[in-house]
Image: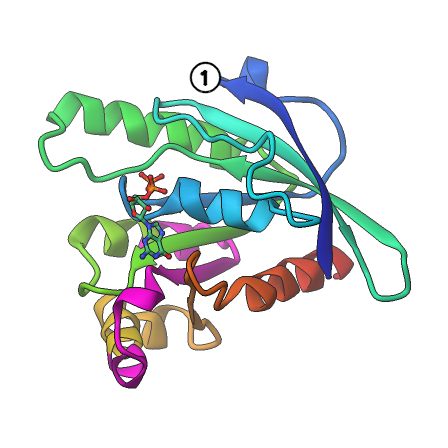
Amino acid sequence: FTIIKANYVATAVNSSQYPAGDLTEIAFIGRSNVGKSSLINSLCRYNGLARTSCTPGKTQTINYFSLTGKLPDESRLEFMLVDLPGYGYAKRAQTARANWSKFIEEYWLTSPRLKLVCQLIDLRHPPMESDCNVYRWLVAHGLTVQVVATKADKISKSHILKHSQEIYKGIDMLNLNPEGRVLPYSIVSGAGRNELLDVIKNILLK
Ligand code: GDP
């Protein structure tokens, strides 16, 4: 499954601005600085183009990109990549945090075409409380979650498994979602990219 086209579609701050259409949505979420913009750029890359129109913003907005992927039999699958604002700024005030939750909840609760949430967690450190809370919330709301462990190139190969296990344990995945899997990803080596595209393809073909 290879990406052959990526286009910026829209930016929204509330549900009245969500783009219309019937494309399946795949959302990306994670703590700020986890590597979300980098990963989205790495996924959107096609035909050797390092940068596409996928340039996620840093502000509290929801950004939509339409992506087209090609299957080995040449058929095409189109979907909407949804970039959600990062959570867990250390200094963020209580009210700002409450606003973030309301903002995101409005998206989850009014997006019937949302079929997969990719939650990004930094592979270098054990998950933070906010990672655990978001994961628990997503699973409790019946969403399909793919945990993607970012910056895998910063960990020696022999430690990747150990760090992944810290994530499984930390977010209580074995209890909350026994079928879940942590997928290590690196924008430097490209590790995990084909696997993540496969996960997305399987959701789209379901
Ligand atoms: P965001 O705030 O979640 O959008 O994070 P960014 O995409 O801006 O990434 C934060 C920092 O992590 C940047 O300096 C990136 O270059 C770096 N980064 C992101 N992904 C990777 C990765 O896979 N490997 C390495 N070595 N650095 C990464």
20 with respect to 189 (left or right): right
The residue sitting at the top extreme is 16
Q: Which residue position holds label 1?
A: 13
Identity, as a three-letter code, of the amino acid under mark 1: Val
| Quadrant of res 106 | top left
Residue 1, above or below 96: below
Q: How is the image coloured?
A: rainbow
Can the viewer see residue 115? no
Residue beneath the point at 38% across and 25% down = 103
Tell me where the magenta segment starts and ends, as one range.
Answer: 136-162
Give coordinates of residue 162: x percent, y percent: 25, 82
Residue 27, above or below 203: above
Q: Quadrant of the N terminus?
A: bottom right
Query: Which residue is nearer to you in this view: 90 or 94?
Result: 90
Residue beneath the point at 89% across and 55% down = 75
Can the viewer see residue 159? yes
User: SS class of the residue under badge 1?
Assistant: loop
203 with respect to 162 (left or right): right
Query: Which residue is nearer to you in this view: 198 or 108?
Result: 198
Give coordinates of residue 124: x percent, y percent: 22, 64
